[in-house]
Amino acid sequence: MNSIVSLPARAAVWFLAFAMPTAAFAQGADPAGSGPINNALLWLQGTLLGTVATTVAVMAVAAIGFMMLTGRMNWRFGATVIVGVFILFGATTIVAGIQSAAG
């Protein structure tokens, strides 16, 4: 009889001590060495939300409109394109809404 506390109780204490996140882990600045990664992701975001994305979105919506004019509209493809454009250009708003709801 080594201890009074049972094995499942000790396992629960270890789980709560090491597996559960605390406020100290959830807060803080970016980790060391993440500067180049952040810069690369910001460049990618600027590229995807800049002129390239706008041009591709305009061409995709124009193609959907042309398909509607000729009567060959695939509604699933059209809905996918429109929803994709909304998600692409509304990503910052969507993320900000999720962060404000979580915080």
Image (spheres, rainbow, N blue to C red):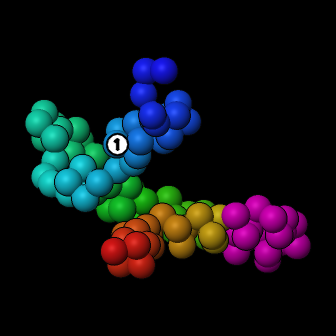
Q: Where is residue 6 in the image (x, y as percent from the top left)?
A: 52, 34
- Closest to the observer, 62 or 102: 102
> Considering only vertical position in the picture, is 27 above or below 82?
above
Label 1 sits on what residue type?
Answer: Ala
Q: Where is residue 36 in the image (x, y as percent from the top left)?
A: 16, 37
Q: Main secondary structure of the magenta part?
A: helix
Judged left or right of residue 39, residue 18 is: right
Q: Where is residue 12 in the image (x, y as percent from the top left)?
A: 48, 41
Q: In which quarter of the image is the C terminus?
A: bottom left
Which range is magenta?
Answer: 64-80
> Considering only vertical position in the picture, is 69 above or below 34?
below
Q: Please tell me which residue is depicted at 45% across the width and 34% down the height of the picture.
A: 4
Residue sticking out furthest to the front: 1
- Closest to the observer, 73 or 90: 90
**Mark 1 secondary-structure assignment:** helix
**Quadrant in which residue 76 is drawn:** bottom right
Residue sticking out furthest to the right: 71
Judged left or right of residue 56, residue 39 is: left
Q: How crowded is mark 1: few (under 14 residues within 10 Å), some or many (20 or more)?
A: few
> Considering only vertical position in the picture, is 75 above or below 16?
below
Q: Position of residue 49 (x, y in %)?
A: 36, 62
> Considering only vertical position in the picture, is 17 above or below 84?
above
Q: Please tell me which residue is depicted at 20% across the width and 54% down the height of the picture.
A: 24
Per the image, the residue denoted by label 1 is: 17
**Magenta-span inclusion, residue 78:** yes
